[in-house]
Image (cartoon, rainbow, N blue to C red):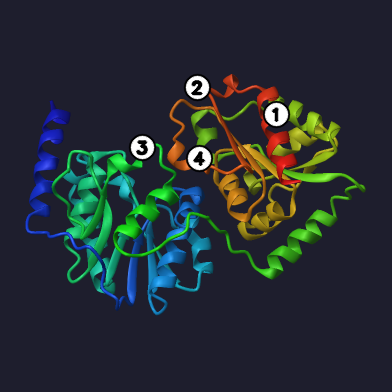
Amino acid sequence: MLTSIKQWLLPLLMRRMAVGRKMKACLAADVRSIALWQFGGVGDMLLATPVILALQKAYPEAQIHVWCSTPAFAGFLLRFPCVKKIHAFPVYGFDSRTLLDSGKRCELRALLAEMRGWSPDLLVNLHVPAMLDWWAVEWWLAARLPSCRTLGFDPRMMRDASVYDVSLNATARDGTHYPVLYRQLLQKAGVEADVQTIFPFTGQEKTSAAALLARQDLQAGQRPVCMHIGARRLQMEGKMWPLERFAELAMRLVEQGFIPLVTGVDSEREMAEALCSSVHACRNVAGCTGIGEMAALISLCDGFIGHDSGPFHIAAAVGTPCVAICGRPDAEPEYLNYNRKDVAVLTGVAPGAITVDAVFEQAMGVFLHAG
């Protein structure tokens, strides 16, 4: 009953927010401050990097502030000169039930005050929410930013109304890789964008990564391949590819002259050690790098294999041939479909549905294609 009421009431409220809003074909030329909304993990942030580059080129004097669900995952965006600050916007914590709580409503009003206090000239919202509640929250905030031009997405049922000056309907998302979708939104506003993601690492990080690689004592002819066997979200959901399959895959890679470097954060080091104990040719470098050094290390390797998590998107961003293993029924091509010969994605209804043979075959295809 409550769900039915929500499905009726929220679209009604959203239509009222859009009343009087006339969509504009282009944006103002003089933009000095830009609010960028993007939510999710490191991979989501990487998918937004072509937008940052496009905005930086279109508005070279502008500063960008990023509002995101988890600032820790967006810290690397500060490496772009135009990105000046990362703010917390816990959008996933706002829904129809939580907003009945006065504390949550105060939190939302404080968030609006923070955005108004910075007074952006332009808002670019890259989120295409999975829940109507989040659409409503984001529209409510966007509609209350005075003197701000806005770009964003509209729910499917909003075919004739929007709170944004320039928008795309969510139907455009279906099967479209997010950088391509974002380019379509920016082009509608008169801003050209590429679709190539990027991870900017420093010269010092590359030097440190090269030194770490040198310490692995690889022999002549052996080719390093990064292997990421963890994944925070998939581990919580119990959807990681079995460790024994990674071990079998590693042995087959070694037979072909590749040496797996097992990468990951410090909390994944024990898991990496278990794999290296099973396959002695593997090298455990989990927990040995920060995110920038990890990106640099991946860039120095001949390939990458891992779950569909942040390091996979880093590999795609730095141009290393890569294979993603995605054993869940809700795999979304919007995240995974890079449409590149050096990027392969294997999906299945469950981790066990993806075989070692299939991963190995795809890996040989992308690694040898690049080689």
- At a point 38% along the width and 68% down the height, the residue shown is 65
The reply to whether callout 4 and callout 2 are in contact (CB within 8 Å) is: no
Mark 4 surroundings: few (<14), some (14-19) or many (≥20) residues within 10 A: many
The Cα atoms of the two marked residues, 1 and 4, are separated by: 19 Å
Q: Position of residue 107 (x, y in %)?
A: 25, 56
181 lies above or below 256: below
Q: At label 3, which amino acid type do we have?
A: Asp
Asked if the residues shown at circle 1 and circle 4 are in contact, with their CB atoms under 8 angstroms apart, the answer is: no
Query: Residue at the location (75% across, 66% down)?
Result: 207
Nearest the eye: 369 or 22? 369
Q: Earlier in the sequence, mark 3 or mark 2?
A: 3
Q: Is residue 199 left or right of residue 258?
A: left
Q: How far, Cα to Cα, is label 4 from label 2?
A: 15 Å
Pointer 3: what residue? 174
Q: What's under tag 4, amino acid-wise?
A: Leu
**Mark 2 or mark 4, which is nearer the start of the sequence?**
4
Q: Label 3: few (<14), some or many (≥20) within 10 Å?
A: few
Residue 361, label in figure = 1
Q: Is residue 107 visible?
A: yes
| Any part of residue 103 in sight | no
Marked residue nearer the N-terminal end (1 or 4): 4
Q: Earlier in the sequence, mark 2 or mark 1?
A: 2
> Which dot marks residue 227?
none
Residue to which mark 2 is pinned: 349
Q: Are marks 4 and 3 in contact (CB under 8 Å)?
A: no
Instruction: Give the labeled residue for mark 4.
Output: 336
